Structures are given as structure tokens and as C-alpha cells.
Image (spheres, helix red, strand yellow):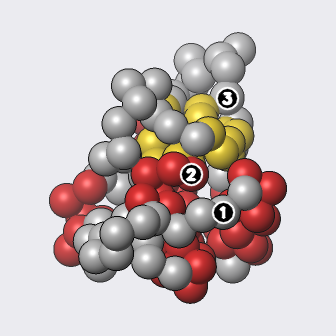
């Protein structure tokens, strides 16, 4: 989604976190139950401070976990508030973009790469 307006949408962190929670509520329960050792976080900006990254999955996806996968910190899915707001013109755009980003990052947890996500329309 390309931003066309002069000013990004303004939204509190609390409201943005609610939208992330609502997006998670839309994920089928049987899929959520298959997620393992992962936390979902909201941050204002990625570590480099750029506005080009809406979400990030960090960890070992489920397809790469073997018998020796144990005692590790949870994988992290981070949804970035300010970059998301910067590409949206309305709150409805934010709701849609958050939902897409949440699904996209969860898909990485299941081992689906960016190329396949783009083919499926979740890029």
C-alpha cells in the first residue's frame, strides 16, 4: 500500500495494539494452536529506525525445528506501529494493513517465505 496523503494516520499505541489483537482474533483457532514458542509484540520502529519495515519474524520457523530444538527463547513477531501508520491514509487502511502484516509474519513462523506470500497475495 503506497501512502498518498501528506500526513500519515495518527493513532495511539494502545489503539494500534488493539488492532493487532483484533487481527489475531481473525486467525483461525486451529492455526493459532499450532503456533509454538512465539510471542507477538508491537514496537514503534524497527531497530534501524526506518519506516520501510511493517513487521518482522525472528526465530526458527516450525519447519526447521528438529529434535534438538529445546531451551530457546521464544521466536518474535514484531509489528511496527509508525511505519504502518506512515503508509496508511485512514484508520480502515491501518486495520487492513495490520491484518495483512500479522498474517504475513505468522506465515513466516510456519516456514512460508516472502516469494510464496507474494504469490498468495499476502506480500
Q: Are marks 2 and 1 in contact (CB under 8 Å)?
A: yes
Instruction: State the CA–CA distance, disc 2 to disc 1.
Output: 9 Å
Mark sitting earlier along the chain (1/3): 1
Residue at image position (53%, 68%) is 9
Dot 2: element: helix
* SS of the residue under disc 1: loop
Q: Is residue 26 shown left or right of residue 101?
A: right
What is the CA distance from the residue labelled 1 to the residue labelled 3? Answer: 28 Å
Please give the residue where the numbered disc 2 appears in the rendered image.
81
Secondary structure under tag 3 reads loop
Quadrant of residue 29 within the rendered picture:
bottom right
The mark lying in front, picked from 1 and 3, is 1
Q: Residue at x 31, y 47 (%)?
A: 52
> Where residue 56 sits in the image (x, y, percent)?
45, 42
Residue reaching furthest to the bottom: 92
Q: Residues within 10 Å of mark 1 (few under 14, many from 20)?
A: few
Q: Measure the alpha-carbon separation of dots 3 and 2.
A: 21 Å
As drawn, 123 above or below 74: below
Q: Which residue is mark 1?
A: 11
| Lower position in the chain sequence, tag 2 or tag 1 | 1
Q: Which residue is mark 3?
A: 74
Q: Is residue 1 visible?
A: no
Amino acid at each position: 500500500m503506497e501512502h498518498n496523503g501528506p500526513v500519515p494516520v495518527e493513532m495511539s499505541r494502545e489503539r494500534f495494539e488493539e488492532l493487532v489483537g483484533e487481527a489475531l482474533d481473525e486467525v483461525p483457532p486451529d492455526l493459532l494452536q499450532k503456533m509454538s514458542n512465539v510471542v507477538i509484540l508491537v514496537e514503534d520502529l524497527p531497530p534501524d529506525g526506518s519506516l520501510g519495515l511493517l513487521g518482522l519474524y525472528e526465530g526458527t520457523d516450525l519447519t526447521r525445528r528438529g529434535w534438538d530444538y529445546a531451551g530457546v527463547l521464544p521466536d518474535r513477531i514484531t509489528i511496527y506501529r509508525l511505519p504502518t501508520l506512515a503508509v496508511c491514509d485512514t484508520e480502515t487502511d491501518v486495520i487492513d494493513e495490520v491484518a495483512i502484516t500479522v498474517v504475513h509474519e505468522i506465515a513466516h513462523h510456519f516456514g512460508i517465505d516472502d516469494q510464496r506470500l507474494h504469490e498468495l497475495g499476502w506480500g
